[in-house]
Image (cartoon, rainbow, N blue to C red):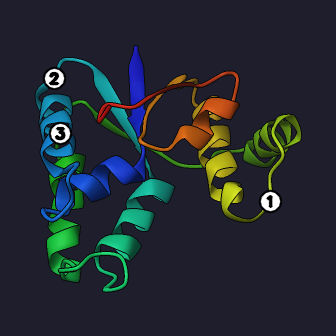
Amino acid sequence: MSYAIDVNILLYASDAASPMHARASAFLRESVSGREVFCLAWLSLMSYMRMATHPAIFERPLTHDEAARNVESLLGAPLCRVLGEEEGFWHRYREVSSEVPTKGNHVPDAHLAALLRQHGVVTLYTHDRDFRKFSFLRAIDPLA
């Protein structure tokens, strides 16, 4: 069994000013040292790089190197798997986006949901309630 981790968990774990920081950091530490495969999408990792280094998002944004080292530490975990689009992804995306109204800011959600469906991952740890609308996903908030 495996699960995926959404970008918002990564961001909270990196933002010491966030009230969610301690819980997100603890969750990531458990994931890295756990016995279950955890998945990260390239989409989520690149979003993390964009947002963690952005001064409009973090009061004290990370440098590119700091954010990259955080990503590298996750990628180095023995049970980490990185997910990317494979042949047939567009078909999965169209399926997912036809089941849930998709426009604007919900496009990246549908993208991640389609990617998870393509790889057979049905559990997503996220603080974003919007993922609950995808019937095949079990969206769990580890910060609640």
Camera-side residue of 17 and 78: 17
Residue 20, placed above or below residue 39: below
Camera-side residue of 94 and 84: 94
Residue 5, placed above or below residue 60: above
Discs 3/1, front = 3
The span from disc 3 to disc 1 (Cα, nearest Å) is 31 Å
Residue 62: x and y in percent read: 19, 77
Rendered image: mark on residue 11: none
Which badge, 1 or 2, is on the more N-terminal residue? 2
**SS under mark 3:** helix
Discs 2/3, front = 3
Q: Are marks 1 and 2 in contact (CB under 8 Å)?
A: no
**SS under mark 2:** loop
Q: Which residue is mark 3?
A: 23
Q: Residue at x 26, y 19 (%)?
A: 36
Q: Residue at x 42, y 34 (%)?
A: 4
Sort mark 1 into few (<14), some (14-19) or many (20+) by Cα contacts within 10 Å. few
| Outermost residue, top side | 1
Q: Amino acid at mark 2?
A: Gly
Query: Taking 47 as reference, is 138 left or right?
Result: right
Q: Which residue is mark 1?
A: 103
Residue 110: x and y in percent read: 69, 47
Rendered image: mark on residue 34: 2
